[in-house]
Amino acid sequence: MTNLNIPKTIKYVITDFDGILTDNTIFVNEDQTISRQLNFKDIMAISMLKKSGIELAIISGEKNSAIELIASKFRLKEVHQGIRIKIDVLKAIVERNNLNHDEFLYLGDDINDIECLDFCSTKITVPGAVMAVKQVKDIQITVEKGGNGAFREVVDCLLNT
């Protein structure tokens, strides 16, 4: 059962990828490519968001094919990969979409997410986040782990399902 408090005014979910939609594990294949494991509950949550009319944006420090697949499958408008300083991208998304602070939330789990979390009114992380993220003022922590239904927990709470 979740303990999240998410305002019903949210129009945009903005999230990091690794550690939120994955468990932060990468697999190095024989051909030296990298792959990630995703949980179908989290993928279903993306579909649920889109069907509800709530938009999803991804801001990732890494560039990977899993993000590209999700972006294509769900026709995401705001997908930003290989971003080291995420706050500028977050502010641009907010401005481009004319969002007030009560109309978006941010999910992140590592130090490169702290500026974004500090900027947001609704900020969420996962149990496996680094300690510095868990100490962000007013941060909420999901019950489920990243890559194991944490994103779905947020969406279920947001949509009251």
Image: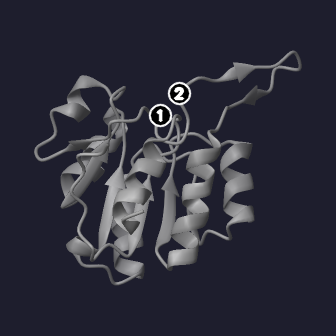
Disc 1 secondary structure class: loop
The number of discs equals 2
Quick one: quadrant of the N terminus?
top left
Cβ atoms at labels 2 and 1 below 8 Å apart: yes
Disc assigned to residue 19: 1
The answer to which image quadrant residue 25 occupies is top right
Amino acid of disc 2:
Asn
Q: Is residue 99 visible?
A: yes
The residue under label 2 is 24
Residue in view at x 61 percent, y 56 percent: 44
Q: Nearer the viewer, residue 59 or 50?
A: 50
Disc 2 secondary structure class: loop
Instruction: Judge whether 131 appears above or below 119 on screen.
Output: above
Q: Nearer the viewer, residue 67 or 112?
A: 67
Q: CA distance from mark 2 to mark 1?
A: 5 Å
Local crowd size for mark 2, using a 10 Å CA cut-off: few (<14), some (14–19), many (≥20): some
Q: Is residue 89 visible?
A: no
Amino acid of disc 1:
Gly
Q: Residue furthest bottom?
A: 98
User: Residue 46: x, y in percent?
Assistant: 57, 60
Work out whether mark 2 precedes mark 1 in sequence or the reverse, and give the earlier one. Answer: 1
User: Residue 13: x, y in percent?
Assistant: 41, 63
Local crowd size for mark 1, using a 10 Å CA cut-off: few (<14), some (14–19), many (≥20): many
User: Residue 73: x, y in percent?
Assistant: 74, 63
Looking at the image, residue 145 sits to the left or right of residue 80; the answer is: left
Residue in view at x 50 percent, y 77 percent: 52
